Structure formats: C-alpha cells, structure tokens
Image (tube, helix red, strand yellow):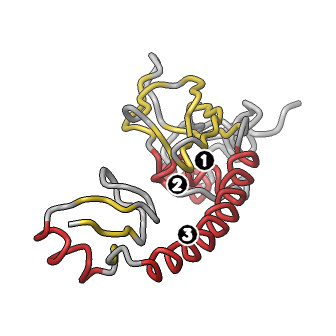
Amino acid sequence: MKVLLRTNIEKLGHIGDVVDVKTGYARNYLLPQGLATRPTEANIKSVEVEKQQRLEELAKIRGEIEARAALVRGKEVTISARANEEGHLYGSVGPAQIVAALAAERVFVEPENVVLEEPIRRLDKYDVELTFAEDVTATIHVWVVPAREIEGEDGEQAPGDDQPGADRPPDAANHDAESGENAGQDTLE
C-alpha cells in the first residue's frame, strides 16, 4: 500500500515521501497515528506546506543549537575530586559533575549532551565532547584536580594550625585553658 509520510520516520522515509508499506502497517499504525496519509493530490499539496513549515522550524532550531555549541566550544572547567597519591579518584567524574561545573560557569547543557566512553577515574586534563545534534558537536577541556581538605587555596596553613595545642585533640586544648596549665608559656622574652 502506498502512503504519503507526514513526518520523518527512521528507516522508512522523510516528510513528503510516498512510500510502499505493508497494508497492515499502514492501516494499524501509520494512518491511525497521523504519521502518514493517502497520497491524493490535495494531501500532497497539504504535506508540502507542512514540510516547508517544518523546514523553517528546523532551521530556527538548528541555529539555536549551533549557537549553544559555539558558546561551549573550547571552554575549560575544573572539577575537584578526592584522590589518592597515585592520582586515582575515590569514585569517578561523570556527565552530571561536568554539567554542574559548566552550570557554575553559567553555561547550561544537559547530561545527555556529554559523551564519555567511561567515567573519569584519574586526575588529569580531558577533552570531552558534547553532542547537541547529529552533526553539531563541541569539545570542552575538563581539568580534574585533587580536592584540598586541609590546605587552603594558596597552599597556606588552615586557620588555627599555628595555635598552641592545634596538634592535640580539642578536648585537651580546652582542658589546658580551663585548668590554667601552660598559662604564660605563649609569651616569648
């Protein structure tokens, strides 16, 4: 049975194509779903108008997608993660963390756009591809760096490390202050 496609159908054809399909497929699926119609002269003209409108919509959407890709292309983001001395991460960095790092830079993408063959499991610089459409991609640079737990951003000691009793448990330092022990040892003469 010949039908006129009203939309693009994968492995069958594009909008406006007249294709030959099995009768049951046409009657039970394509026609009731509104995906195809009978190829009459009036329907062909109607589908051509729909096709032009659809192509204009697709061109507008395509422009927006390309603009998003251009905005992201070449961007660098840094993700801090806990790792051992050899650089192996405790866990991994995946699309969700990359999307969050981009969002912190005011660039918004979906996790589905991030293409990773496998999660990142080591400290290093990675080139990560983002796919926005079949042929619209962008590459970003992701730095995975060790998280700083004790040291500050500049490598300075955390506040309180140079105070007396800082290497002792907090209870011992409080006990010394309350009992008056070590009073006067803090001054140098």
Could you tell me how far apart the alpha carbons at marks 1 and 2 are, in whole angstroms? 8 Å
Crowd around label 3: few <14 · some 14–19 · many ≥20 (10 Å): some
Q: Which residue is mark 3?
A: 51
Total tally of numbered discs in the picture? 3
* Residue 47: percent from left, percent from top: 49, 75
Q: Is residue 94 above or below residue 88?
A: below
Q: Amino acid at mark 3?
A: Lys
Q: Amino acid at mark 1?
A: Glu
Q: Quadrant of the C terminus?
A: top right
Image quarter of residue 148: top right
Q: Where residue 181 is drawn, which disc sits there? A: 1
Observer-nearest residue: 165 or 150? Answer: 150
Left or right? Give the position of 34 relative to 93: left
Q: Which residue is mark 2?
A: 175
Q: Residue drawn at (56%, 41%), measured in percent from left and top?
A: 135
Mark 1 or 2, nearer chain start: 2
Q: Is residue 117 above or below residue 68?
A: above
